[in-house]
């Protein structure tokens, strides 16, 4: 399928219309993949989809500079140390002996020479499986999945192509081989010109009957003159480039290597990950299990600088008949540090470094006990894969059913030894998950004794698999394109202020301007909007920031050129802005007084239990409750009644009020949450509330939304903040009755505009339910799902259903905590415009203030 490229990945779009076709899980229950390329309700990404390059996958300057390059250096150093231990017979290599035994890449003939491979330079040409994943802060990060499931050599040889059948220039391929030999073996410049005369040969790999898709169909034409001939004597050969298992090498090649007369590239021991029999067997049951052996060698890593490494390893759970851990499987990793999206860390901080609490992996995966979950956790089993000590699949969390979860939890509860890896799904384009198979080219630097990465090394290729049934034999192939856009390169290289109060802020600001400019297209960026994008002191103007930028750059002249380019992309505000249709109504003192009174009526009235999980049934919570009903239902009725009265007063027959009912369903049982339990028994349902205000064009709508539930109070729950474990809903004056009050007071204004024919399209006021934990964006997930599925059904007061699916939503404004203020930074109105072109189109309309002259 390598010849299909993007056209195959997007085939069948849209496939997700119809009820239940596009379920959206809570982040806390299943961390989803980042959706790239094209969102199900939006347009295509102009950076990712290039018509002139149907096989290209762009990699930004920031990804390569701050994640991939430093991450590969870390991986290379760690792997090289382990390979040196392996070659010298030291047990500290981290590889279980059972995975070395009967491994064709490390047979007894080779293992018997440990400690005597003195000529070895430990060249690594290891094909890594990488992908971008999402963490619980919403950051999208390049992540190590392990060794390439496409085998040890496909990524290397595919590096010398840019598309099916399109080979790199010959000199570029030969230049890499020359640079590798010079760097790793100190071969003089004069001798590498003629690689064949130097003694470099290539020995292709035989087909593996168990993994036929590992086969390399054709080597680049440029290197075919270097192929080892069947009758060629070994004595004149100094370097052999081959990915064959050591057992498959000709006896003369084995002897020459063991005698130190021949260098094998790569170091043969570095390929052992593809010869581990237990994982080759597991691959038959667990998708892409051949990634796992290499992943096991690394500790978990979550730092934003570098490559993310999910935790994997073995865990032991005691049982009545369990004999205890088996050392042949390697060391145990029984504990896990939980993180969640409400953790108070900065974007550049390593959360694991500031987190001390560790929980048993088994509890992290399956426990639903209130004390294990706290305020912000859920079982993580759907983001994990599990297998037994005899390498039988127990759980493939992403694709597992509820029964699979129950079975796996029971197996762990019975005790024993289990392998696992946390698996955050790789980037998803349409129905396909994407992996980058990138060769890591490194060697032992004889001068420093450290691993050295070869710069400008081969980049490998990418594979796209059906996300529901990933099959390495059925891959759509793409090729990476490292972007080299000068302003972005300058942003990446000029601003490295790591130890300042706000590290890397200049770089982030420059990138925001550049990326936003791309999304805005040819319309240009208003200066007022550019200033709003910057994170700088409140009294600093756009011109002041641009003027100071060169002095903060490591190369001021280059910084001046960058500042000039940023200025060139800005446009002046119009001489006069359109007259506001609403400001004369909301700028009055009477409106402000009504605003605060409305907030007070919502926050200090009868609505006390306004979390979706209310009322929680544990003893600590029950002791504090004034009553034992869920007031969220009553609050919803109050809001619906408010809008019905307004519509009747306005006499607007085309306006509608209703709700979007649904049930709260989860993979695990949380029967200690009264709200959740009543959903399962049918005593209640959840609902978003919706008000449809008609405009001239009924086929389009803009949504204004809030959430009307409130969070549990940390200071009433957390012991270190004076709490006693009670889950009590906050009054919610700021979060989020301030936004609810805004919509309640805005409705009469919109109704008046509708009656006067001044609304170009419909306005929908949507009160979302279940934003706060533990419901976790419950209502917004439901709304997005039914919009994507073209299945938006509104329930009216009489119970009749009204179909809204023919209306296309053109934009969404979500309001949250809009009355928030503090003494340190007052009157901040924060806008998060999203990452797509359509979201960016909406954002400038919120900036109405002209920049100072």
Image (cartoon, rainbow, N blue to C red):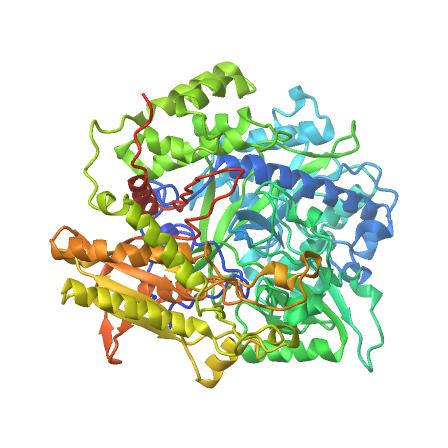
Query: Which one is in front, 295 or 351?
Result: 351
Residue located farthest toward the top when viewing the structure as drawn? 557
Q: Quadrant of residue 633?
A: bottom left
Report the quarter where the C terminus lies.
Answer: top left
**Percent of width and height locating residue 473:** 50, 61
Report the quarter where the N terminus lies.
Answer: bottom left
Q: Quadrant of residue 431?
A: bottom left
Q: Which residue corresponds to the image point at 56% horizontal and 61% vertical from the top-left?
A: 212
Q: Which residue corresponds to the image point at 39% horizontal and 19% vertical from the top-left?
A: 564
Q: Is residue 20 left or right of residue 351?
A: left
Q: Is residue 47 left or right of residue 191?
A: left
**Percent of width and height locating residue 694:** 17, 60
Query: Which one is in front, 840 or 90?
Result: 840
Q: Is residue 234 left or right of residue 533?
A: right
Q: Quadrant of residue 517?
A: top left
Residue 428 vertical position relative to residue 85 in the rendered view, above or below: below
Query: Which one is in front, 532 or 44?
Result: 532
Residue located farthest toward the left when viewing the structure as drawn? 756
**Percent of width and height locating residue 795:** 28, 75
**Percent of width and height locating residue 547:** 44, 18
Residue 518 vertical position relative to residue 216 in the rendered view, above or below: above
């Amino acid at each position: 399928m390598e010849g299909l490229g993007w056209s195959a990945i997007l085939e069948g779009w849209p496939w997700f219309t119809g009820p239940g076709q596009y379920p959206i899980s809570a982040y806390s229950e299943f961390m989803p993949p980042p959706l790239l390329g094209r969102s199900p309700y939006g347009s295509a990404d102009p950076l990712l989809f290039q018509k002139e390059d149907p096989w290209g996958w762009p990699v930004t300057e920031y990804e390569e500079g701050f994640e991939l390059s430093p991450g590969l250096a870390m991986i290379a150093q760690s792997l090289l140390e382990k390979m040196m231990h392996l070659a010298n017979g030291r047990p500290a290599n981290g590889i279980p002996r059972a995975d070395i035994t009967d491994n064709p890449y490390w047979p007894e003939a080779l293992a018997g020479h440990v400690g005597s491979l003195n000529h070895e330079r430990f060249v690594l040409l290891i094909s890594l499986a990488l992908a971008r994943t999402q963490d619980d802060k919403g950051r999208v990060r390049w992540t190590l999945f392990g060794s390439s499931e496409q085998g040890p050599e496909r990524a290397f040889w595919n590096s010398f192509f840019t598309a099916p059948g399109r080979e790199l220039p010959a000199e570029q391929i030969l230049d890499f081989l020359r640079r590798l030999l010079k760097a790793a073996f100190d071969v003089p410049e004069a001798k590498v010109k003629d690689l064949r005369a130097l003694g470099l040969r290539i020995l292709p790999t035989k087909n593996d009957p168990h993994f036929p898709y590992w086969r390399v169909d054709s080597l680049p034409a440029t290197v075919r003159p270097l192929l080892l001939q069947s009758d060629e004597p070994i004595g004149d050969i100094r370097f052999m480039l081959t990915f064959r298992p050591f057992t498959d090498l000709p006896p003369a090649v084995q002897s020459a290597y063991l005698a130190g007369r021949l260098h094998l590239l790569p170091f043969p021991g570095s390929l052992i990950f593809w010869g581990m029999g237990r994982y080759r067997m597991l691959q038959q049951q667990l998708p892409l299990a051949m990634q796992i052996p290499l992943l096991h060698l690394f500790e978990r890593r979550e730092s934003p600088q570098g490559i993310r490494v999910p935790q994997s390893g073995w865990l032991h759970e005691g049982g009545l008949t369990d004999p205890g851990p088996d050392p042949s499987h390697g060391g145990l990793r029984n504990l896990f540090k939980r993180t969640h999206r409400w953790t108070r860390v900065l974007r550049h901080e390593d959360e694991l470094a500031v987190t001390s609490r560790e929980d048993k992996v088994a509890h992290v995966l399956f426990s639903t006990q209130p004390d294990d979950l706290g305020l912000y956790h859920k079982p993580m089993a759907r983001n994990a894969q599990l297998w037994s000590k005899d390498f039988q699949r127990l759980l493939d969390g992403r694709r597992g059913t509820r029964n699979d979860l129950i079975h796996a939890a029971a197996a762990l509860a019975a005790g024993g030894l289990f392998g696992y890896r946390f698996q955050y799904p790789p980037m998803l384009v349409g129905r396909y998950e994407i992996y980058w198979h990138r060769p890591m080219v490194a060697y032992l630097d004889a001068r420093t004794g450290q691993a050295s990465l070869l710069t400008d090394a081969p980049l490998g290729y990418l594979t796209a698999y059906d996300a529901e049934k990933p099959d390495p034999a059925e891959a759509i192939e793409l090729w990476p394109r490292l972007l080299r856009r000068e302003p972005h390169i300058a942003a990446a290289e000029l601003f490295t202020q790591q130890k300042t109060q706000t590290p890397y802020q200049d770089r982030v600001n420059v990138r925001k301007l550049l990326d936003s400019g791309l999304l805005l297209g040819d319309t240009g960026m208003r200066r007022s909007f550019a200033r709003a994008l910057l994170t700088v002191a409140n009294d600093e103007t756009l011109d002041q920031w641009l003027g100071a930028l060169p002095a903060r750059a490591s190369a001021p002249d280059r910084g001046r050129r960058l500042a000039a380019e940023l200025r060139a992309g800005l446009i002046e505000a119009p001489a006069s802005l359109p007259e506001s249709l609403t400001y004369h109504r909301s700028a009055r003192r009477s409106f402000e007084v009504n605003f605060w009174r409305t907030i007070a009526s919502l926050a200090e009235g009868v609505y006390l239990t306004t979390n979706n999980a209310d009322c929680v049934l544990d003893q600590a919570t029950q002791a504090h409750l004034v009553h034992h009903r869920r007031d969220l239902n009553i609050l919803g009725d109050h809001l619906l009644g408010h809008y019905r009265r307004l519509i009747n007063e306005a006499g607007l027959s085309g306006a509608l009020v209703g709700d979007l009912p649904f049930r709260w369903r989860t993979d695990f049982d949380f029967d200690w949450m009264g709200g959740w339990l009543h959903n399962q028994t049918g005593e209640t349902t959840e609902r978003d509330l919706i008000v449809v205000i008609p405009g001239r064009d009924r086929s389009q709508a803009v949504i204004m939304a809030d959430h009307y539930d409130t969070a549990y109070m940390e200071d009433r729950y957390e012991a270190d903040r004076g709490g006693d474990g009670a889950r009590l809903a906050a009054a919610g004056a700021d979060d989020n009755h301030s936004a609810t009050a805004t919509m309640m007071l805005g409705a009469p204004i919109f109704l008046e505009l509708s009656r006067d024919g001044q609304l170009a399209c419909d306005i929908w006021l949507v009160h979302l339910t279940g934003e706060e934990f533990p419901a976790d964006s419950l209502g917004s997930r439901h709304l997005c799902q039914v919009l994507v599925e073209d299945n938006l059904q509104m329930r009216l007061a009489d119970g009749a259903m009204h179909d809204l699916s023919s209306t296309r939503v053109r934009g969404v404004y979500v309001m949250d905590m809009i009355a928030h203020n503090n003494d340190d930074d007052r009157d901040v109105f924060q806008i998060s415009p999203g990452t797509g072109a359509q979201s960016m189109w909406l954002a400038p309309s919120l900036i109405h203030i002209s920049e100072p002259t």
